[in-house]
Image (cartoon, coloured by chain):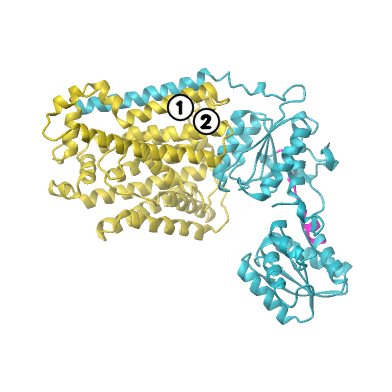
Chain colours: A yellow, B cyan
């Protein structure tokens, strides 16, 4: 932590005075993991049809795009930025794949083209944020509409459905002997890459530093613009990949594919403990949160709870988690009165 | 080093959660067996789930009402589920849910003919009977499609209604949706043939297109009436067009002089039927459609039919039905709404 001489560093160092079990149990990420386990256990015991292996299959197929896009989104949000255009990019890459197939390209080429569109779209977001210096919220609200408009414009209200069956089958295929879908393989590889990138490289430390203080990060040698550019391009290309998966899973390229997905991704990221103000968050919390949202939706659907009630419950959970985070921060601040040595503070805490 | 330890512990926590999730799933795999469903017995698993395009849509509320009535008549259990938005990806989750629940039959109005196919076939592999209604999928992903009306039936009822309303002679015009709408054009073609064959005194003077846009349809109606002063009737085979045309007629001098009919929904047309602008228009009855779909599901569950062409089954108060080509069952002639019956409908 040579690059961030900040309060966050101090806080982290203080936290390490506490015993390991307390550090684990008292984190927000741990709370989400605990809640996930609780919901799985309760749902298995009480909801008919939940406790069967196929549940895991459907659940993971459903949330795979959220899991995938949440990886770059977590990093972007740790820098204090946001990308609202990811759902539209999924739709656009779906349409590009479809149009490519329609034009007679082999699937592999059409998919590569879609990934390229992801790179270009992400770079466009990155350009407007870093070079032009616009706020990412404004930029990506714009590209949210732009990418969706392009998607719907290219294909209209029609759908392309003639994808090669080997690929559509692969998108839903289960790993031999389990009910875990194959899409989890690229996800786990990407997860590993993102974990290493965020937690084990100077680039990752730069991401936290930018989120805590852009100026401090810049003064300590972090290339703020380059970092953000890389992250937006990653978000674009991972969204495009999710779009290809989405297209294959449903065997249908449509302009309205994955409408509103960006909100589910952001919900998972925020619920998973990433601060909306940047500087704080862990990937495992986000993964657990995405699973939690998926498990809740699955269990509630099985209990024949209507879709609007499911949305309400997910929304309330999200609001509560944000409120809880603020309350926790406030409590921590209240406990650490200035001038008081951290050792004493932690040892007297209840 | 402490950093690394925290990370390892974090990963371990996730692993434990995942393991618990997995074992939790496996352990209770048998307790959630669907065969204990009440209503199952010799006649099979009579749990019928309706999956409309979206919830909170009066049209589908009406079809589900019919479906529920039928399920109660044959002693099954009825459920209605569905997404808030009419998208195929959201429907897939609900199809998967029905598969997990092991329902007897799923009655679906498809948001996309292809996108939900694999999920439906997975459900069928798990012994769920699949009936589509209102909006079909590709025929190879369902057991039966309950068709609300045929193109011929829709064309004929509209010609019959206009002929009756203008005394079988005079000039008429058509206000359609867009010029390249496949179904509209097929109806218009058939209507032209019927007019030529059976109504020699009726002249179709012009076909205009309102693009299924309320304002455009409204303006096109106005233009139509100005350019054809002797116009006696308008057929609008689109629910957007007919209500826009009715709105124009109701506030103009043509009210009561120029007849208007076509395809509309009772809620859109109610005020124009009540104020005398429109005498009668057609559509199908979604309540009967849901009712028939539920009985078809029952016939599939009990094995009375397999969905093959020529199979026949009884649909309660609607009588007997026969399965046609491509596993399609036709509800019947379109339903005519007029001042006498419009009060019975809310969609």
Among the two numbered marks 1 and 2 on one chain, the one whose residue lies closer to the N terminus: 1
Answer few, some or many: residues within 10 Å of disc 2's Cα (few below 14, many 20 plus, some between 14 and 19): many
Q: Magenta span has A90?
A: no
In this picture, residue B257 sits left or right of residue A317: right
Q: Residue at x 70, y 48 (%)?
A: B134
Q: Which residue is mark 1?
A: A39
Query: Residue B194's quadrant in the figure?
Result: bottom right
Measure how far apart labels 1 and 2 are at the Cα level: 9 Å
Residue A25: x and y in percent read 30, 24
Q: Which residues are magenta?
A: B143-156
Q: Please identify the quarter of the rendering in which residue A137 is found.
A: bottom left
Q: Which mark is residue A299?
A: 2
In the structure shown, which secondary structural element does the residue marked by tag 1 occupy?
helix
Q: Quadrant of the C terminus of chain A?
A: top left
Location of residue B139 with respect to A58 vertically, above or below: below
Chain letter, disc 1 residue: A
Tell me residue B57's x, y (percent).
Answer: 63, 49
Residue B98 visible? The answer is yes
Percent of width and height locating residue A29: 33, 31
Where is B26 relative to B119, above or below? above
| Viewport quadrant of the N terminus of chain A | top left
């Amino acid at each position: 932590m040579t690059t961030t001489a900040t309060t966050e560093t101090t806080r982290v160092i203080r936290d390490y005075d506490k015993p390991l079990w307390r550090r684990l149990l008292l984190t927000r990420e741990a709370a989400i993991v605990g809640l996930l386990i609780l919901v799985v256990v309760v749902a298995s015991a009480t909801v008919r049809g939940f406790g069967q292996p196929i549940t895991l299959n459907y659940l993971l197929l459903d949330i795979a795009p959220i899991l995938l896009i949440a990886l770059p989104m977590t990093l972007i949000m740790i820098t204090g930025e946001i990308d609202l255009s990811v759902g539209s990019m999924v739709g656009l890459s779906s349409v590009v794949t479809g149009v490519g197939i329609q034009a007679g390209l082999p699937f592999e080429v059409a998919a590569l083209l879609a990934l390229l569109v992801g790179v270009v779209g992400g770079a466009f977001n990155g350009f407007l944020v870093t070079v032009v210096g616009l706020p990412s919220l404004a930029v990506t609200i714009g590209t949210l509409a732009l990418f969706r408009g392009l998607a719907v414009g290219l294909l209209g209200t029609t759908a392309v459905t003639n994808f090669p069956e080997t690929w559509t089958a692969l998108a839903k295929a289960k790993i031999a002997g389990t009910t875990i879908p194959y899409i989890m393989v690229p996800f786990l590889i990407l997860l590993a890459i993102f974990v290493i990138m965020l937690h084990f490289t100077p680039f990752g430390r730069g991401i936290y530093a930018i989120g805590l203080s852009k100026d401090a990060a810049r003064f300590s040698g972090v290339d703020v613009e380059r970092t953000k550019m890389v992250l937006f391009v990653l978000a674009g290309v991972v969204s495009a990949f999710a779009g290809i998966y989405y297209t294959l899973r449903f065997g249908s390229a449509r302009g309205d594919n994955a409408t509103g997905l960006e909100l589910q991704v952001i919900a998972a990221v925020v619920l998973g403990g990433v601060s909306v103000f940047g500087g704080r968050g862990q990937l495992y919390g986000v993964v657990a949160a995405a699973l939690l949202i998926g498990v809740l939706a699955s269990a509630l659907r099985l209990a024949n709870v209507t879709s609007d009630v499911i949305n309400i419950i997910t929304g309330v959970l999200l609001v509560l988690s944000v409120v809880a985070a603020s309350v926790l921060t406030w409590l921590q601040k209240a406990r650490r009165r200035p001038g008081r040595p951290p050792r004493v503070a932690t040892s007297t805490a209840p | 080093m402490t950093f690394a330890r925290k990370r390892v512990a974090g990963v371990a926590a996730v692993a434990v959660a995942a393991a618990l999730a997995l074992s939790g799933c496996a352990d209770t795999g048998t307790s959630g067996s669907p065969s204990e469903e009440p209503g199952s017995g010799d006649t099979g698993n009579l749990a019928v789930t309706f999956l409309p395009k979206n919830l909170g849509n009066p049209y589908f509320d009406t079809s589900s009402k019919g479906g529920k009535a039928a399920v109660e008549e044959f002693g099954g259990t009825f459920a209605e589920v569905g997404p808030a938005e009419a998208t195929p990806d959201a429907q897939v989750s609900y199809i998967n849910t029905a598969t997990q629940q092991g329902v007897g039959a799923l009655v679906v109005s498809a948001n996309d003919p292809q996108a939900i196919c694999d999920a439906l076939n997975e459900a069928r592999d798990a012994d769920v009977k699949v009936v589509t209604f209102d909006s079909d999928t590709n025929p190879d992903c369902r057991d039966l499609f309950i068709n609300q009306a045929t193109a011929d039936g829709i064309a004929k009822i509209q010609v019959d209604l206009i002929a009756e309303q203008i005394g079988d002679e005079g000039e008429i015009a058509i206000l359609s949706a867009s010029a390249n709408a496949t179904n509209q054009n097929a109806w218009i073609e058939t209507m032209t043939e019927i007019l030529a064959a059976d109504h020699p005194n009726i002249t179709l003077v012009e076909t205009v297109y309102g693009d299924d846009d309320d304002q455009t349809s409204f303006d096109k109606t106005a233009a139509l009436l100005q350019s054809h002063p002797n116009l006696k009737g308008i057929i609008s085979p689109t629910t957007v067009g007919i209500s826009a045309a009715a709105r124009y007629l109701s506030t103009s001098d043509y009210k009561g002089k120029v007849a208007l009919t076509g395809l509309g929904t009772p809620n859109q047309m109610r005020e124009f039927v009540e104020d005398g602008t429109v005498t009668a228009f057609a559509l199908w009855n979604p309540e009967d459609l849901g009712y028939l779909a539920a009985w078809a599901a029952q016939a599939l569950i009990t094995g009375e039919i397999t969905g093959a062409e020529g199979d026949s089954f009884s649909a309660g108060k609607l009588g007997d039905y026969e399965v046609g080509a491509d596993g399609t069952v036709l509800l019947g002639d379109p339903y005519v709404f007029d001042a006498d019956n419009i009060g019975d409908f809310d969609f």
